[in-house]
Image (spheres, rainbow, N blue to C red):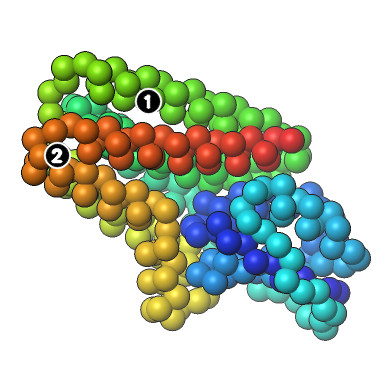
Amino acid sequence: MNKTIFEITKMDCPSEENLIRMKLDGIPSIANLDFDIPNRKLTVFHSGETDQIEKSVIELNLGGKKISTEQTDQTEFNENANQKKLLWSVLAINFAFFIIEMTTGIISKSMGLVADSLDMLADSFVYGISLFAVGGTVIKKKRIAKLAGYFQITLAIIGFVEVLRRFFGDEKLPNFSTMIIVSIFALIANGICLYILQKSKSKEEAHMKASMIFTSNDVIINLGVITAGLLVNWLSSSKPDLIIGTIVFVLVIQGAFRILKLSK
């Protein structure tokens, strides 16, 4: 058995971890994957050469590079029997907040909340692809990934068009208090998701959990929407909301292209 360590600089939340798992699924030489998200490290236990594994990791464009390969006597790995249940939990939380943020975003006229809801939907897609294709073929997973990726891009483009319409039109100010309150709850929800997933890895140290939570893109986005809400109130302008919405839509499209890479 060989142990190969990869550094993956853009792996900063469980969504990227799941993308990597799906990408490497189907490579018969892999015995186990061990993720260290706070330190951006992936350890692959495998037989044979690393060429196919390294190529798959690099193709995701997450800043992956091989650090080392060495032989190991380890042949038994502790698989978490509750992994599927945990994935269902985070899928439910993400999808629920997609609906909440989309609804409140439309009502409060906040593009920041609408964009953040699509980011939640993107995470739901990633977890859903794994769950709904469990036991299925690699081809089935790739088909689902393609549909999810294109659907996500379509929604983001519609969002961009709406941002432009509001930017050049005479649009009322978004409800800043709704932006802030809903984003705070979304921030808490993301923290819960990260905590749930972290528990599955038997890493109970508080600093590891904190590192995982506060380096997450989802948390940064939530804080961005909260800041935009404060600026909307302070400046009496809708521009901060439109700016954060645009930034998040770009992130959503980047995530969609990562999902589409799984379909190749």
Q: Amino acid at mark 1?
A: Gly
Q: Earlier in the sequence, mark 2 or mark 1?
A: 1
Q: Furthest residue to the right?
A: 48
At x 42%, y 53%, the residue is: 217
Residue holding disc 2: 232
Frontmost of labels 2 and 1 is: 2
At x 67%, y 59%, the residue is: 64
Q: CA distance from mark 2 to mark 1?
A: 19 Å
Left or right, residue 184 beside residue 237: right
Find residue 240 and report its horizontal and vertical position in percent: 22, 38
Judged from the image, the secondary structure of the residue bearing numbered disc 2 is helix
Left or right, residue 244 beside residue 255: left
For the residues bearing labels 2 and 1, Cβ distance under 8 angstroms: no
At x 30%, y 36%, the residue is: 243
**182 or 222: which is nearer to us?**
222
**Numbered mark located on residue 258 in the image:** none
**Numbered mark located on residue 159 in the image:** 1
At x 25%, y 18%, the residue is: 168
Q: Is residue 79 above or below residue 226?
A: below
Q: Quadrant of residue 209?
A: bottom left
**181 or 248: which is nearer to us?**
248
Q: Is residue 211 above or below residue 10?
A: below
Q: Looking at the rendering, in which quadrant would you find the N terminus?
A: bottom right
The answer to whether residue 44 of the structure is visible from this angle is no
Left or right, residue 106 beside residue 117: left
Q: Looking at the rendering, in which quadrant would you find the C terminus?
A: top right
Judged from the image, the secondary structure of the residue bearing numbered disc 1 is helix
**238 or 77: which is nearer to us?**
238
Disc 2: CA contacts within 10 A as few (<14), some (14-19) or many (>=20): many
Q: Amino acid at mark 2?
A: Val
